[in-house]
Image (tube, rainbow, N blue to C red):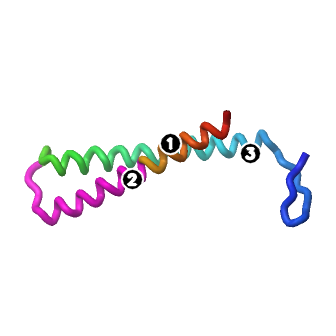
Amino acid sequence: MGTTRGGINMPVNKKKNQKNSEDMLGLVSHKFKGPLTTINLYSEAMLIGQVGKISKEQKEYLDEIHKASKKMTKFINDYVRSAMKEKK
């Protein structure tokens, strides 16, 4: 069985595609979520004053960092959830 791309019948290796998909999920889950969790936790700690007082300008920068990391974390979680649904 194969797929057609540009009029050319190409064989599909389902096991290889599934392995590549699982590898990508593992990469996303481990390599991206780990550092993002650290960014989320440290930026939140700084924003609530756990590590000392910060200036208004520093707070604005930290707010942007924290919002962006939360947004990226949500994107990754949605991607992983979607990929898992496709596997079923």
- Magenta stretch: give its range: 52-73
Label 2 sits on a secondary structure element that is helix
Q: Which comes before the other along the chain, label 3 or label 2? A: 3
Q: Main secondary structure of the magenta part?
A: helix
Q: Is residue 80 left or right of residue 48?
A: right
Quote the CA–CA distance across marks 3 and 2: 28 Å
Write the residue at 76% across / 43% down: 16
The residue where tag 3 is placed is 17
Circle 2: residue type: Lys
Secondary structure type for disc 3: helix
Disc 3 vs disc 1: Cβ atoms closer than 8 Å? Answer: no
The vertical placement of 18 against 67, above or below, is above
Counting from the top left corner in percent of width and height, residue 26 is at 56, 41
Q: Is residue 32 above or below residue 81?
A: below
Q: Tell me if residue 59 is in the magenta stretch.
A: yes
Q: Tell me the residue that label 1 is attached to.
A: 29
Rendered location of residue 54, percent (x, y): 11, 57
Front-most of residues 37 and 1: 1
Quarter of the image for residue 4 reads bottom right
View extreme (top): residue: 88
Of 38 and 62, nearer the camera is 62
**Front position among marks 3 and 2:** 2
Give the residue number, with chain letter if any, for mark 2.
Answer: 71
